[in-house]
Image (spheres, rainbow, N blue to C red):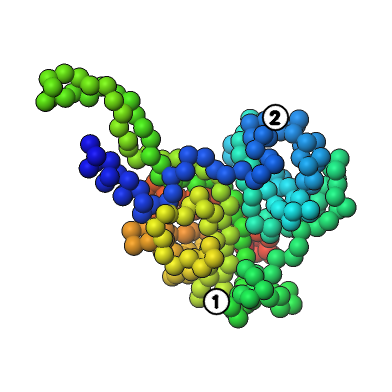
Amino acid sequence: MHTALYALVAAAAVLPAAAMSQDTPSGLKDLVGARAGQSEGELGRRGYVLVRTQTDDDRKWTFWFNAAYGRCVSIATIEGRYQSIVETPVVDCQGGNQQQSSANVGNQQPPAYAGNSPQTGQQQGARYTVDGRPVDLGLVCFGEGHRPAIANRSEWVWNSDRDRYDYGTRSELTSESVDATVTLQLWENGGRIRLPKELVPIIHSGANDGWWALNDVVAMPDVITASYRLNGLNKPKVSMDRRSGRISIRGVSPYEFTGQCDVIDGEDHRRF
């Protein structure tokens, strides 16, 4: 039993971390599970201002900005209740019309996004550069991901040495769903992707301050494809539909992410 459990844990180590719950920003944990309509006023009293709303198949995302903390949070609502509250990049709170709330903190807007940091990104007219490369396309994609988790099961097991059934627990790998936000930046013949910690393995390689280099980037008229290397066993493939704005990431099962990207509709009716 000990040998099997050790092998199980070792296998999980090369896949995304199996935390049982997604972290919620401090000061907002009590709102998870609350009714959305009743909680909007409370968010305003805590200094958050509604920036925009996005809907998907079975849930609604609202983005709130707190100017005092420079914090942007994404709230997933399912069946009228807050299902999760997660902190997202400040760029998520840009591009929308900031709405009034009962505690509007001076109508302060989030700071302009200018790359990863003053050392790696700077504004260059309407475009910005990362490590000296002009970024042609920046995307913020929010949706649902799946990662491995370890579950404990209680059951009766036959003990041949003692000639009887023993009741105990065993551990097994399972899949866990998480709400997540993924950020991508693309430039000529390359790019990078920033993953939330929920989609980062315990053992990983190639990360630079949370960013992974995109390899094999191919931009076709209707789809953009790429890949990135999490570790030696997991090299997820990325596919972005330029008409619908949907993104799909597939790695070693059950590692995956599907979502909708924030984009601008062009003259040729592509999303990006």
Spatial separation of the CA atoms under disc 1 and disc 2:
45 Å
Residue shown at the point (38%, 39%) measured from the top left: 150
Q: State whether residue 170 is above or below residue 87.
A: above
Q: Earlier in the sequence, mark 1 or mark 2?
A: 2
> Which residue lies under the disc numbered 2?
35
Q: Amino acid at mark 1?
A: Glu
Give residue 44's quadrant in the image.
top right
Q: State whether residue 82 is above or below residue 156.
A: below
- Quadrant of the drawing holding the C terminus: bottom right
- Left or right side of 196 for 230: left
Q: Nearer the viewer, residue 149 or 234?
A: 149
- 1 and 2 marks in contact (CB < 8 Å): no
Q: Secondary structure at mark 2?
A: loop
Give residue 35's quadrant in the image.
top right
Q: Amino acid at mark 2?
A: Arg
Q: Nearer the viewer, residue 238 or 149?
A: 149
- Left or right side of 174 for 240: right
- Quadrant of the drawing holding the N terminus: top left
Q: State whether residue 207 is above or below residue 8.
A: below
Q: Which mark is nearer the camera, 1 or 2?
A: 2
Q: Is residue 125 visible?
A: yes
- Residue 143 lies, in percent from the top left, at 56, 47
Q: Can you name the residue that lies furthest to the top here?
A: 164
Q: Is residue 214 visible?
A: no
- Residue 151 lies, in percent from the top left, at 38, 35
Q: Nearer the viewer, residue 86 or 95?
A: 86
> Which residue lies under the disc numbered 1?
188
Residue shown at the point (34%, 40%) measured from the top left: 173
